[in-house]
Image (cartoon, helix red, strand yellow):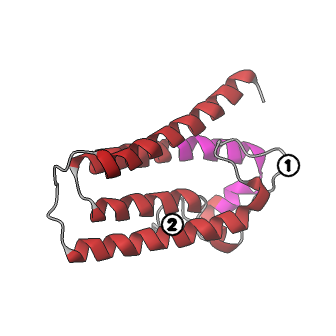
Amino acid sequence: MKENGYRKNVAYAFVQTLLLCIFAGAMFFGPKVWLLPSNAALTIAGDVLCAAGLALLLAALVQIGRALQIAPQPRADATLVTSGVYAWFRHPMYTAILSAIAGLFLREPTVAVGIAGAVAIAFLAIKTRYEERLLLARYPEYVRYKSRTWGIVPWPHR
């Protein structure tokens, strides 16, 4: 990979890590300016989303195995994983992160958590587009795979 491509991949990995750390900081240390009134129903819904995200993340980690990396560029020695949770989602780890962010926001519906979560989710959407271009260039079968799976969120196929 060219030097510029390497730097771009490292930058995406760094920014993702930084944004998730900022989100965690907002959860624990952010000002408690509430967007929604905290209640048991929101807490339960948040717990369910967090648990679903964690389960999906663990399943994706097991499924992807040694191909795992935070940078969007596919590993040179990796093959395209299309089974298990990857049979439904092209980016189940991003789906898991989105689910956890949404769940944590419902548990702590503050301005700081909402903003940090929205920024992290927007970044994942941008990273996904870049990553998909790399996957299309690397794996010819990705076009067909993409046509039959969801991206980050379950959505009707085109």
Q: In this view, does 140 lie to the left or right of 105?
A: right
Earlier sequence position, callout 1 versus callout 2: 1
Camera sees residue 122: no
Q: Please, what is the three-letter code of the amino acid marked with disc 2?
A: His
> Is the residue 6 above or below the residue 13 in the image?
above
Q: Reply above or below: 42 against 33.
A: below
Which quarter of the figure has residue 57?
Answer: bottom right
In percent of width and height, residue 140 lies at: 77, 51
Residue in view at x 18 percent, y 66 percent: 38
Secondary element under disc 1, as helix, strand or loop, is loop
| Left or right, 88 with reference to 48 | right
Give the image quarter of residue 45. bottom left
Tell me where residue 71 sits by quadrant: top right
**Residue at the location (16% across, 54% down)?**
34
- Dominant secondary structure of the residues highlighted in magenta in the image: helix
Mark drawn on residue 157 = 2
Where the N terminus falls, by quadrant? top right
Residue type at the position of mark 1: Asp
Query: Which type of secondary structure does the marked residue at label 2 adopt?
Result: loop
Q: Look at mark 1 in the image and give the residue it sits on.
A: 77
Along the horizontal axis of the image, is 101 left or right of 89? left
Q: Residue at point 42% right, 45% down? A: 120
The answer to whether residue 142 is magenta is yes
Residue 150 image point, x, y percent: 54, 64
* The stretch drawn in magenta includes residue 140: yes
Span highlighted in magenta in the image? 127-145
